[in-house]
C-alpha cells in the first residue's frame, strides 16, 4: 500500500502575504468597485481566515488604501519611459501610456475616483499618483527646478488630461493618437518646452 502524501504548505513571509492579498484586491478591482470587495472574499481566495487579513492590514480601509496605491503604481509603470530618450519622445511615451492605461480601465477608474462617498483616502492616493506624474513630466520637459507657477500648471494640466481622456473615451472616440496630440499640444502651449 502506497502511503498518501499530503502537499506541504509553504509559509509565506509577511511581505509575501501582504503582496498576495493586495494582488487579489487588484484582480477584484478590475471587475467590481472597491466598496464591493469584501474582506471575506479576499480571505477566501487567499485561503486564510478573515481575521488573519487583519493581521496584515489593521482595518478594511488600510487594505483598500494599499489596493488603490498598487493600482496607482500600475499606472505609473504604464507611463514609465526610457530616461535616455529625448524629452519629446519621453513626453509622448508618458502621455500614450497614460491614455492606454485609462482606456483599458476607464470604468474602474471612474468608479473609484469619480464616485462619491469614497473618503479622503481615495483623494490622497489620487494626489500621490498625480504628483508622481507631474514630476515625471517636469523631468521630461528638462525642468529640474521649475518655479511654482510652472509646477502648478503642469499639475493642473494632468487634471485636464484626466478629464479629457475620460470624456474622449466615454464618448466612444477611438482615435487615441489624436487625443495624445491634443494633450501634447496643450502642454506645449502651457509650458512651451516640447
Image (cartoon, grey):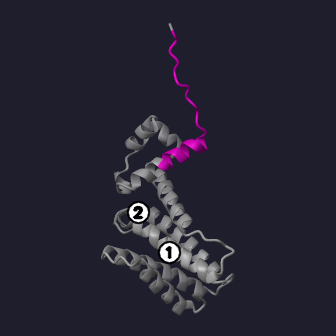
Q: Secondary structure at mark 2?
A: loop
Is 23 located above or below residue 127 in the figure?
Answer: above
State the residue in front, 91 or 155. 91
Magenta residues, as a range? 2-23
Is 79 located above or below residue 190 in the figure?
Answer: above
Mark 1 nearby-residue class (10 Å; few <14, some 14–19, many ≥20): many
Residue 133 located within the stretch drawn in magenta: no
Which is more foreground, mark 2 or mark 1?
1
Q: Quadrant of the C terminus?
A: bottom right
Q: Position of residue 72 (x, y in %)?
A: 51, 63
State the residue in front, 62 or 151. 151
The quadrant where residue 93 appears: bottom right
Residue 18 located within the stretch drawn in magenta: yes
Q: Position of residue 100 (x, y in %)?
A: 45, 70
Instruction: Tell me, for residue 119, which label it has, or none.
Output: 2
Residue that badge 1 annotates: 96
- Is residue 59 shown to the viewer in this render? no
Q: Position of residue 41 (x, y in %)?
A: 38, 42
Amino acid at each position: 500500500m502506497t502511503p498518501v502524501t499530503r502537499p506541504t504548505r509553504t509559509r509565506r513571509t509577511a511581505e509575501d502575504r501582504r503582496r498576495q492579498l493586495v494582488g487579489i484586491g487588484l484582480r477584484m478591482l478590475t471587475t467590481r468597485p472597491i466598496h464591493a470587495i469584501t474582506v471575506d472574499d479576499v480571505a477566501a481566495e487567499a485561503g486564510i481566515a478573515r481575521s488573519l487579513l487583519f493581521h496584515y492590514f489593521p482595518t478594511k480601509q488600510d487594505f483598500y488604501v494599499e489596493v488603490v496605491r498598487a493600482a496607482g503604481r500600475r499606472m505609473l509603470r504604464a507611463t514609465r519611459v526610457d530616461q535616455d530618450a529625448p524629452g519629446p519622445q519621453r513626453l509622448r511615451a508618458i502621455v500614450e501610456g497614460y491614455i492606454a492605461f485609462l482606456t483599458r480601465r476607464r470604468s474602474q477608474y471612474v468608479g473609484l475616483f469619480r464616485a462619491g462617498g469614497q473618503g479622503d483616502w481615495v483623494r490622497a492616493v489620487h494626489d500621490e499618483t498625480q504628483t508622481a506624474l507631474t514630476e515625471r513630466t517636469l523631468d521630461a520637459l528638462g525642468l529640474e527646478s521649475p518655479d511654482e507657477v510652472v509646477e502648478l500648471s503642469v499639475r493642473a494640466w494632468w487634471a485636464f488630461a484626466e478629464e479629457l481622456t475620460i470624456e474622449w473615451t466615454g464618448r466612444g472616440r477611438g482615435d487615441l493618437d489624436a487625443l495624445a496630440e491634443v494633450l501634447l499640444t496643450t502642454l506645449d502651449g502651457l509650458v512651451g518646452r516640447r
